Amino acid sequence: MIEAATQIPSALRRSEGGASSGIAAFERACPAGTTGARYGELGKVAWYRGNSGERLHEVGGKQPNAWGLYDTLGNIWEWCWDIYDAEVYGTYRVLRGGGWFDEPWSCRASVGRRSHPTLSLDDVGIRLARNTVRPEAPSGRTPAGCT
């Protein structure tokens, strides 16, 4: 599964309905409305160098954020759709969230790094995001069951 996930960024196409989230979406979803550097005590919400045993862990082993998202901090760095700095790095993408081998200061929504989308890294993964459109009834009202 980890090997397959490293191939996703180069194969993603927004027209297929899914994409990695952008920096702005990640920075909003990760803290889930909290205002601190993290949405909880680091050891309770993230796998990082101090508690990971220097290895990747299954998703969901730590507490989720207030929106129910697991592992938005630690465990793996998440690919973001955004280009890091095209003039300097070309097609390098932004990574956010920190990983299992990182120090505590790296495991925050605002900390990022970069990588080329063709590289296979054992501490990088992807969270797919999808926009949904609420269907509307012909009268312009929301159909029953779609609140």
Image (cartoon, rainbow, N blue to C red):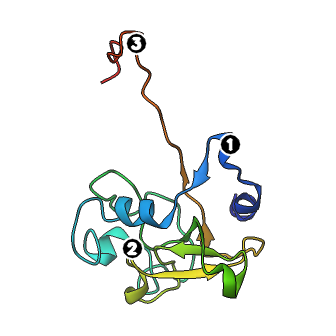
- Closer to the chain start, of discs 1 and 2, is 1
- Closer to the chain start, of discs 3 and 2, is 2
Q: Which residue is mark 3?
A: 137
- Residue shown at 32% from the left, 61% from the top: 63
- Closer to the chain start, of discs 1 and 3, is 1
Q: Secondary structure at mark 2?
A: loop
Q: Front-most of 56 and 139?
A: 139
Amino acid type at circle 3 is Ala
Q: Is residue 75 left or right of residue 109?
A: right
Q: Are marks 1 and 2 in contact (CB under 8 Å)?
A: no
| CA distance for labels 3 and 2 | 38 Å
Q: Which residue is mark 1?
A: 15
Amino acid type at circle 1 is Ser
Q: Front-most of 95 and 58?
A: 95
Q: Is residue 47 left or right of residue 37?
A: right
Amino acid type at circle 2 is Ala
Give the class, few, some or many, for how many residues have Cα within 10 Å of label 1's Cα (few <14, many ≥20): few
Q: Position of residue 126 (x, y in %)?
A: 59, 61
Classify the position of the N terminus by image quarter: bottom right
Residue 71 visible here:
no
Q: Quadrant of residue 122?
A: bottom right
Q: Front-most of 15 and 4?
A: 15
Give the class, few, some or many, for how many residues have Cα within 10 Å of label 3's Cα (few <14, many ≥20): few
Number of numbered discs present? 3
Q: Are marks 1 and 3 in contact (CB under 8 Å)?
A: no
Q: Is residue 119 left or right of residue 35?
A: right
Q: Which residue is mark 2?
A: 109
| CA distance for labels 1 and 2 | 27 Å
